[in-house]
Image (tube, rainbow, N blue to C red):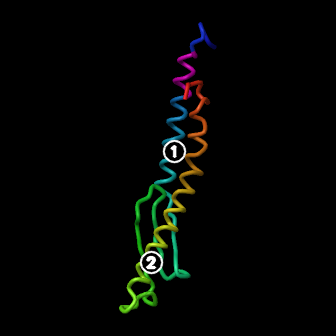
Amino acid sequence: MRQGGQPNMQKLMLQAQQMQQKLAAAQAALAEAELTGTSGGGLVTVTVSGSGEFRKVTIDPKAVDPDDIETLEDLVLAAITNASEGVRKLTEQKMGPLSAGLGGGMGLPF
């Protein structure tokens, strides 16, 4: 209920608390998630948390050619890029609905 054109502060505080709880839950889900990026048909695999922490790099010995380090570097970079894209998509999925509600969802002028 508005009084004199002002938003109901109690309602706004409740909505802010609910949004904070949803945000914390989404952040926790991201931190627990693990995504894998691969390249070279699985020759290089990178594991990263949903919060962006790289946890593991696996390189198949078949990818290691001392006379062609550049290809291995490219494979590692491609796997990292692939894993990072997975993190971006997961973050968008988990956080997108929360950020969409910030605009006017709480009656705040954004």
Q: Secondary structure at mark 1?
A: helix
Look at label 1 and name its amino acid: Ala
Residue drawn at x 42%, y 82% as measured from the top left: 72
Q: State the residue lying farthest toward the top.
A: 4
Look at label 2 and name its amino acid: Asp
- Magenta span contains residue 62: no
Decide: is 10 above or below 22. above
**10 Å crowding of disc 1: few (<14), some (14-19), many (20+):** some
Give the residue at mark 1. 25
Decide: is 49 above or below 22. below
Q: Main secondary structure of the magenta part?
A: helix
**10 Å crowding of disc 2: few (<14), some (14-19), many (20+):** some
* Sequence order check, earlier mark of 1 and 2: 1
Start-end of magenta stretch:
7-15
6 relative to 55 in the view: left or right: right
Q: State the residue lying farthest toward the left.
A: 66
44 relative to 1 in the view: left or right: left
Decide: is 70 above or below 77. below
Q: Could you say where residue 2 lies in the image, as x and y percent from the top left?
A: 62, 12
Q: Nearer the viewer, mark 1 or mark 2?
A: 2
Give the residue at mark 2. 74
Q: Could you say where residue 53 lies in the image, as x and y percent from the top left?
A: 41, 60
Q: Secondary structure at mark 2?
A: helix
- Magenta span contains residue 11: yes
